[in-house]
Amino acid sequence: MYVIVTVMRQDFDQPPGRLLGPLFQPPRDPAPFALRPEESRGRFHAETESATRTCFQRDRDRIIHSTAFRRLKHKTQVFVQYEGDHYRTRLTHSLEVAQIARSLARVLALDEDLAETVALAHDLGHTPFGHAGEDALNAATASIGGFDHNAHALRLVTKLEHRYAAFDGLNLTWETLEGLVKHNGPLTPPYAGPIASFDRRWPLDLSTWPGLEAQVAALADDIAYVNHDIDDGLRAGLFGVDELAEAPLAGAHTKAVTARFGELDLGRFTGEMVRTLMSSLVEDLLAETGRRIAQAGPKSAAEVRGQGRGLAAFSPAMEGCVRALKDFLFVRMYRHPRVMATMNRAKDVVSELFEALSRDPGLLPPDWARQCGAPGDAVTGGVVRDYIAGMTDSFALAEHARVFHREIALSAP
């Protein structure tokens, strides 16, 4: 039986330590529609499972210890890493998503470990320089199939990570791979690239929705990034509190914090506003998901996959508000001239590196160069694509300087 959260709040006018409202008690037993480790479809390569961890806990640990996960520390979320120590990177973003996903899964009596695992892995395939880097690499590789970060994440965990003697990749469970590939919903045929290739070896049921754990992780991503991007945008001065007060959804929370506390320093204001905005999103998500579950009545994870629609969701009203807030951030932040100037330079770094390394694979490290075909052919292009996709922001700049014998500054002068 799952339980919808009862919000716990602290009244600032009460003595320290006094909590108002009932404390939330997490359910003891998993819901019938939760994914269960003992019912996993297993791993592509047979392994003896751990005596101390479930298979999903083991997947989580393999992701945390992977090279690809560590590299997220130096990959752009919105701001290039060296622009400030407090801005989110892909790593800190992934940790925030994992925290929210785990909390949501606990309330819904899902498998918390699997939800956390999918959340931690969801951005593994990102290029340096965020979506700008992905756009540039996709354009540069259009003739050989392009680039998609979800497809590359699957390639990383099934091929490119080299930690084990017996196999390539991390040998994750079927359920984790399903969540990694389909957390945003079913894929539309025709399937191509790494996803199609792997699906032929071990079908991932690409046309169905994933389990609720992956669905929850995807929505935790939305909750995390709209909140932390507001924090980062205010900190960077891309918009002010007065502008945020007129923004969809966040505006009401901004005005409420100002009315209650008056003028606050930016750190305190952001903390208060984000926590109330995040709580409203979480509460709405849990209420709507609970309503959909009650209506559908799934008795197994298989019945969740067979619904033909996602069961984890915001209410229609909240979904519209979130979309409008994303539009506000798109204009005020993601397309702000300061951000665009940096990202346009970053695109040039990726494009120029791909062209130069494809034309002369001898510029690659020896172990990468040995995998190449002839200069400029599809095999070489695929190797170079993988090489660039794995770069951090700082390494991409260093490689560009090495290849072109000149430094490039991303920040606007």
Image (cartoon, rainbow, N blue to C red):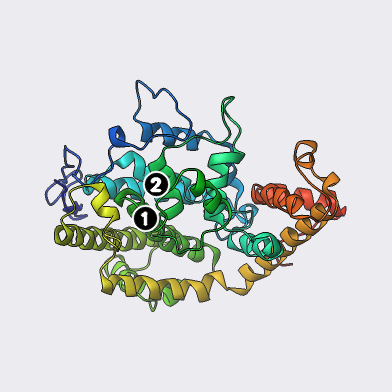
Residue bearing mark 1: 220
The image shows residue 340, relative to residue 387, as above or below, that is below
Indicate the amino acid at tag 2: Ala
Instruction: Count numbered badges in the picture.
Output: 2
- Tell which residue pokes out farthest to the front in this image: 200
Q: Is residue 291 left or right of residue 110?
A: left
Residue 385 visible in the displayed image: yes
Q: Percent x, y for residue 412?
A: 71, 67
Q: Which label is found at residue 281?
A: none
Q: Which label is found at residue 98?
A: 2
Q: Is residue 266 left or right of residue 348?
A: left
Residue at x 58%, y 62% (from the top left corner):
131
Q: Percent x, y for residue 114?
A: 35, 41
Q: Is residue 394 left or right of residue 293?
A: right
Residue 223, quarter of picture = bottom left
Query: In this view of the protein, which residue sits in the foreground, 331 or 155?
Result: 155
Indicate the amino acid at tag 1: Ala
**Circle 2 sits in a helix, a strand or a loop, which is it?**
helix
Q: Is residue 173 left or right of residue 170?
A: left
Residue at x 14%, y 51% (from the top left corner):
20
Q: Percent x, y for residue 160?
A: 61, 40
Q: Are marks 2 and 1 in contact (CB under 8 Å)?
A: yes
The image shows residue 271, relative to residue 65, as above or below, that is below
Query: In this view of the protein, which residue sits in the foreground, 379 or 330?
Result: 379
- Tell which residue pokes out farthest to the left in this image: 22
- Tell which residue pokes out farthest to the top in this image: 51
**Circle 1 sits in a helix, a strand or a loop, which is it?**
helix
